[in-house]
Image (cartoon, rainbow, N blue to C red):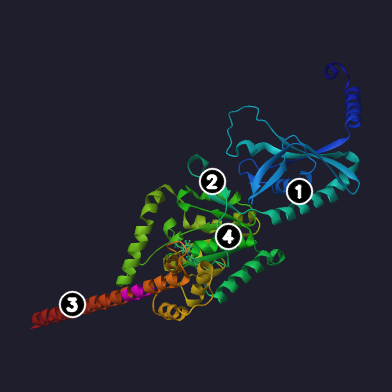
C-alpha cells in the first residue's frame, strides 16, 4: 500500500525510520560461519573447526545441551544444536549458537548429509563490531587452532566411487606405526625425521621462495619392506590426515582435480603401488634383454592384472596426475605431503618422479642388522642376546624383508621365550640362504645352456654362409 500510494520521498523516509526502529529494538549483529564453503566444490571451512574446538574447550562446564563423541578413546562433550553459549572477552559479551539450516525440499539429498548445513551463529552488540572483527575473532580462531592441534585425531580418507566420485569418505586412523617401530637404518631414519620437521615449520620459507607448501616423497623397495608402515608413521608423527587415493576409481582428470580441492591442509596424500594403479609409465622399452627383466615384468603384469579392467574405466592421464601434483590447482590447500609407493621404481615415468615433484627418494630395502635390532627390541623386548652375532652374519649373506623377520620374531605359542624366536629366525635365514644359493646355481646353469646353444647356432650359421660362398 505504501509503495502504491505514497510518493517516493515519503516511501524513503518510512524505510529509513523502520530501519532505525529495527536497529533500536534489535541492536545486534549476526555472523554465520558455515561448516562447508563453496557450491560446486565444497570444502571444509577451517574457521568452523577452530570455533568448534574453542567452544568445546569452554562450554563443557556451562552448556546444558551437549553431545558426546569419542575422540582418541576419550569422551568429548561438545555443544549441541540450538544450545547458546555466552562468552566474554576483555569486557565484551557475545553469544554463540550451533544451528542447522533445514532444506526447504527434500529433493536435494546431499553427500554431506545432515552436517551439510550446520553453522555457528555469532551475535554481538553493533557497538562492538570493530573489536569483535579485529580482536575477538582472532583470539577465538587462534585458540581453537591450538586446541585442535593438541587434540588432533588423524583421519584416513579414501575417494568414493560411482555417483560420489570426486568426493572423500573417512574413518579415524588408528595405525600404531611410528618411527620407534619402523625398522630401518638409523641414519636414514634421522634424515627423514629431520626433513619432516623442517618441512612442517617452513611456512614462511615456502612463501619467500614462491613455492606452494608441499613436498613429495617416493618410497620404493621390495614388498614387505615397510613402505605402508612408513606412510603411517609419517602421518602419526606429523599428525596429518591421510588421503589415500585409489587412482583406478577416479574416472577423469576433472574428477581428480575435484578430489584435490577437497583435501584440507596438514595432509599426506598417498598413491600406493603407483606402478600398478594406471598405465602412467609412458613409453617403455619393448626388448627387455635378460631373464630377470622378463620375470620382473611378468610380476608387474600380474600385479596390475586386477587393475587392468578398472583402468579401462579410468581416463586419468599422466598429465592429469602431474597437474594434480604440482599444477596451478595444487596450491589451493595448505601444507601437504605427497607420497608415492612402488615396488618397481625403474618402471615409472621419469617426469613423475623427478626432483621437485618427488623431492626425496627413499629406498626401503631388505632387513639389515640395525633394522633387526629394532624389531627385536619391539617384538621381544631385548637389546642384546648371544644369538645376535649369528643373526648378523646371516643377514649379511641373505636378503630377507623386515616383514619376514617380524613374522619369525612373533611368539607362536603363549609365553614363548626370546631364544626360541631367535632360533626360529636363524633357521628361516638359513633356509632363505640355501634357497638363494640354489636359485643362483640354477640361473648360472640356464645361462650356460643358453650360451652354448647360441655358440652352436652361430657355428651352424657360419657354416651355412661358408657353404653358400663356395
Ligand atoms: N621396516 C619395517 N619396520 C617394521 N615393520 C615392518 C617393516 N617392514 C615391514 N614390516 C612389517 O611387515 C608388514 C608389512 O609391511 P608393509 O605393508 O609396510 O610393507 P610394504 O613395503 O608396504 O609392502 P607392499 O609393497 O607389499 O605393500 C607390516 O605390517 C609390519 O608389521
Q: Which residue occupies 88% across, 29% down?
A: 22
Residues at marks 2 and 1, CA–CA distance in whole angstroms: 34 Å
Residue bearing mark 3:
453
Task: Decide which of tag 2 and tag 4 comes sooner along the chain.
Answer: 2
Quadrant position of residue 297: bottom left
Where residue 61 appears, x then y in whole percent?
79, 44
Whether residues under marks 3 and 2 lie with C-beta atoms below 8 angstroms apart, the answer is: no
| Number of the front mark, 4 or 3 | 3
Where residue 119 appears, x then y in whole percent?
72, 39
In the image, which residues are magenta? 429-434
Mark 1 neighbour class, 10 Å CA radius: few under 14, some 14 to 19, many 20 or more: some
Whether residues under marks 2 and 4 lie with C-beta atoms below 8 angstroms apart, the answer is: no
Residues at marks 1 and 3, CA–CA distance in whole angstroms: 79 Å
Q: Which of the two residues, 171 or 252, is positioned nearer the viewer here?
A: 171
Residues at marks 1 and 4, CA–CA distance in whole angstroms: 38 Å
Residue bearing mark 4:
326
Query: Residue 286: in sight, yes or no?
Result: no
Relative placement, left or right, of 136 versus 230 is right
Amino acid at each position: 500500500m505504501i509503495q502504491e500510494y505514497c510518493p517516493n520521498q515519503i516511501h524513503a523516509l518510512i524505510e529509513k525510520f523502520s530501519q532505525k526502529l529495527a536497529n533500536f529494538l534489535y541492536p545486534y549483529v549476526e555472523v554465520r560461519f558455515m561448516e562447508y564453503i563453496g557450491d560446486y566444490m565444497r570444502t571444509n571451512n577451517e574457521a568452523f573447526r577452530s570455533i568448534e574446538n574453542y567452544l568445546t574447550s569452554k562450554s563443557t562446564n556451562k552448556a546444558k545441551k551437549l553431545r558426546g563423541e569419542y575422540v582418541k578413546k576419550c569422551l568429548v562433550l561438545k555443544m549441541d544444536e540450538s544450545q547458546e553459549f555466552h562468552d566474554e572477552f576483555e569486557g565484551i559479551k557475545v553469544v554463540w549458537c550451533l544451528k542447522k539450516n533445514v532444506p526447504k525440499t527434500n529433493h536435494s539429498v546431499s553427500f554431506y548429509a545432515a552436517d551439510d548445513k550446520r553453522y555457528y551463529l555469532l551475535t554481538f552488540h553493533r557497538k562492538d563490531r570493530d573489536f569483535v572483527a579485529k580482536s575477538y575473532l582472532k583470539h577465538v580462531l587462534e585458540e581453537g587452532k591450538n586446541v585442535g592441534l593438541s587434540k588432533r585425531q588423524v583421519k584416513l580418507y579414501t575417494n568414493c566411487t560411482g555417483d560420489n566420485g570426486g568426493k572423500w569418505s573417512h574413518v579415524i586412523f588408528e595405525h600404531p606405526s611410528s618411527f620407534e617401530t619402523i625398522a630401518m637404518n638409523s641414519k636414514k631414519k634421522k634424515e627423514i625425521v629431520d626433513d619432516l620437521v623442517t618441512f612442517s615449520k617452513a611456512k614462511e620459507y615456502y612463501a619467500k621462495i614462491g613455492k606452494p607448501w608441499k613436498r613429495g616423497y617416493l618410497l620404493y623397495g621390495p614388498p614387505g619392506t615397510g613402505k605402508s608402515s612408513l606412510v603411517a608413521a609419517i602421518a602419526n608423527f606429523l599428525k596429518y590426515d591421510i588421503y589415500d587415493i585409489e587412482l583406478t576409481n577416479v574416472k577423469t582428470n576433472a574428477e581428480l582435480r575435484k578430489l584435490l580441492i577437497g583435501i584440507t591442509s596438514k595432509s599426506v596424500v598417498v598413491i600406493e603401488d603407483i606402478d600398478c594403479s594406471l598405465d602412467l609409465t609412458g613409453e617403455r622399452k619393448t626388448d627387455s634383454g635378460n631373464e630377470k627383466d622378463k620375470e620382473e615384468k611378468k610380476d608387474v603384469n600380474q600385479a596390475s592384472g586386477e587393475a587392468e579392467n578398472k583402468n579401462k574405466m579410468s581416463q586419468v592421464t599422466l598429465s592429469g596426475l602431474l597437474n594434480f601434483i604440482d599444477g596451478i590447482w595444487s596450491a589451493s590447500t595448505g601444507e601437504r605431503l605427497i607420497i608415492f609407493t612402488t615396488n618397481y621404481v625403474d618402471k615409472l615415468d621419469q617426469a613423475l618422479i623427478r626432483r621437485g615433484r618427488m623431492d626425496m627418494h627413499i629406498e626401503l630395502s631388505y632387513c639389515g642388522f640395525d633394522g633387526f635390532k629394532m624389531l627385536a627390541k619391539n617384538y621381544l623386548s631385548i637389546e642384546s642376546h648371544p644369538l645376535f652375532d649369528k643373526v648378523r652374519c646371516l643377514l649379511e649373506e641373505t636378503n630377507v624383508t623386515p616383514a619376514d623377520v617380524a613374522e619369525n620374531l612373533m611368539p607362536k605359542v603363549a609365553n614363548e621365550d626370546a631364544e626360541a624366536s631367535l632360533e626360529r629366525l636363524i633357521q628361516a635365514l638359513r633356509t632363505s640362504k640355501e634357497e638363494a644359493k640354489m636359485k643362483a646355481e640354477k640361473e648360472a646353469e640356464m645361462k650356460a645352456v643358453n650360451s652354448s646353444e647360441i655358440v652352436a647356432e652361430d657355428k651352424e650359421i657360419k657354416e651355412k654362409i661358408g657353404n653358400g660362398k663356395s
